[in-house]
Image: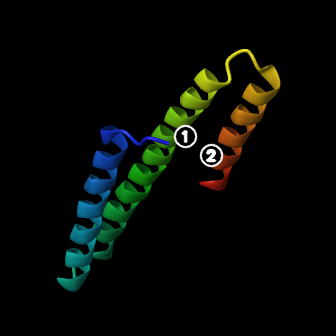
Amino acid sequence: MQYDAKAMNRLKRIEGQLRGVLRMMEEGKDCKEVITQLSAIRSGVDRTIGVIVTDNLLECIRENEGDDDKMNEVVQEAITLVVKSR
């Protein structure tokens, strides 16, 4: 699968947020601030998973257009990926 810049940029942003949280912890920041940032990171990861699964699903549907059995299989795999990520 080809990953687009949108997904990679999201992950780079998350990477920066993680570094920021580590810095906050090293500086002894309040736990509420740390938890707030960790929650934002988790939301970012969830959204990135959604973007990747959606892009992959669209690609697979295009490749299997006309083959209903294969398209149903692809949709089920996408649903399984989303459920696993929870």
Q: Secondary structure at mark 2?
A: helix
What amino acid does circle 1 point to?
A: Val
Tell me the mark number nearer the camera, choosing from 1 and 2: 1
Q: Secondary structure at mark 1?
A: helix
Horizontal side, residue 69 vs residue 66: left or right: right
Name the N-terminal-most of marks 1 and 2.
1
Q: Among all residues in the image, which is located at the extreme top?
A: 66
* Residue 69, x across and y down, in percent: 82, 26
Q: Which mark is residue 82?
A: 2
* Residue 81, x across and y down, in percent: 64, 48
Name the residue nearer the viewer: 13 or 29. Answer: 13
Q: Are marks 1 and 2 in contact (CB under 8 Å)?
A: yes
Q: Which residue is mark 1?
A: 53
Label 2 CA crowd tier, 10 Å (few <14, some 14–19, many 20+): some
Spatial distance from mark 1 to mark 2, Cα to Cα?
Answer: 7 Å
Name the residue nearer the viewer: 5 or 39. Answer: 5
